[in-house]
Amino acid sequence: MTIAVDVTYEPWTGRSDGPGTDNLRWHHVVSSDADHAEPCDVAFVGFRSDEGVRRNKGRQGAANGPRALRGALASMALPTPLQALDVGDIEVRDGNLEAGHQRLGQVITSLVDRGHPVVVLGGGHEVAYGSYLGLADSSALREGGRLGVLNLDAHFDLRDDAQPSSGTPFLQMAQDEEQGERQLNYWVLGVSQPSNTQRLFHTADKLGVHYLPDTQCGLLDLPRVERFIGEFIDSCDVVHLSIDLDVLPAAVAPGVSAPAAYGVPMEVVEHVCATIAASGKLAVCDVAELNPDLDVDHRTARAGARLIHRILTSRGAGRQA
């Protein structure tokens, strides 16, 4: 299987405590062998882009997110052996975000159709539309699977702008689905009222978006969160999980373009990610908006890596259960 990327795979490195499966860390199990006969537990692809952030008048730097996420994940210890594939990165050059979306989509389609769950390492949140393009062209959806998009985010990202940006990906998805005479099954957890204009709330209502505000996503609200996620899982066959790290409180995730003054606790976000992974329906997860230039003590990179780790180890537990 030939996977066309812009930046080739670089071997992962990290701490080693000796041989044996009881000393495994992520960097021990990642390879670049795209021709591996059996589906891996995960295939990673990076999306080096912050062109969407620039267009959305945000603070650039997220193009360096993929490298930082890999670095933070590499030395995390594995509870059980896994097989991971890293195909390299798509890079947006010369401001051509639209072409980058198409290239990312082609990579994701190839990986999903081969049976690999995909984790996309962003990059600005414009990455989400490229992830959608890859799933939309996959055999799972072309054969009638019901798509569900869950966005963990302080923002709806439903802006109706002249150019695609980090603020438009889910409106782009909705428009594409409408062209196919379908309605986008879009759910958002963690929406911040002060960060979204009433126009965006009206757009969300018009599109039939299901959302839970950040003020209803605390630890004491966990039963409500679990009902929300349970209803989402029941509504679809194939899940696209999009994690904008600005859903987390600024103390946990300072390294984003728009740090959250309130945010959803890490414990809740991690629980949601584990629940989605254990459902067996997760096909693609993208992690967006990590800006290493703004990070403090690698907090945001480590938070993003921990969520990825929890998703992929929970997915394994779900299969074994």
Image (cartoon, rainbow, N blue to C red):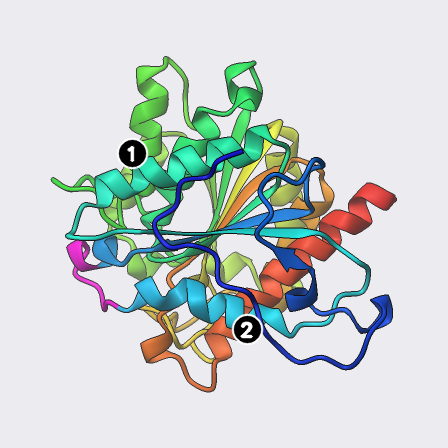
> Residue at (73%, 56%) from the top-left corner?
313
Q: Quadrant of the N terminus?
A: top right
Query: In the rendering, which numbered label is found on residue 172?
Result: 1
Q: Tell me if 321 is positioned left or right of 25 in this view.
A: right
Task: Give the image location of residue 40, x and y in percent.
Answer: 68, 44
Q: Is residue 65 left or right of residue 100?
A: right
Kindly report which numbered mark, 1 or 2, lies closer to the viewer in this rendering. Answer: 2
Task: Give the left or right position of residue 94, taking residue 201 as reference.
Answer: left
Q: In which image quadrant can residue 169 be found?
A: top left
Visible residue check, residue 298: yes
Task: Please provide the residue range marked out in magenta.
Answer: 54-60
Give the answer, above or below, for where 68 lies relative to 207.
below
For badge 2, the amino acid type reads Ala
Relative horizontal placement of residue 263, taking residue 291 as reference (left or right): right
Residue assigned mark 2: 72
Q: Position of residue 74 (x, y in %)?
A: 60, 70
Q: Give x and y (percent) for residue 100.
A: 28, 43
Find numbered disc 1 in the image and state the secondary structure of the residue it sits on. helix
Mark linked to residue 61: none
Q: Residues within 10 Å of mark 2 (few under 14, many from 20)?
A: many
Q: Is residue 4 above or below residue 292?
A: above
Q: Amino acid at mark 1?
A: Gln
Is 171 in the magenta? no
- Cα gap from disc 1 to disc 2, whole angstroms: 31 Å
**Coordinates of residue 218 in the picture (x, y in percent):** 58, 64
Residue nearer the viewer, 159 or 97: 97
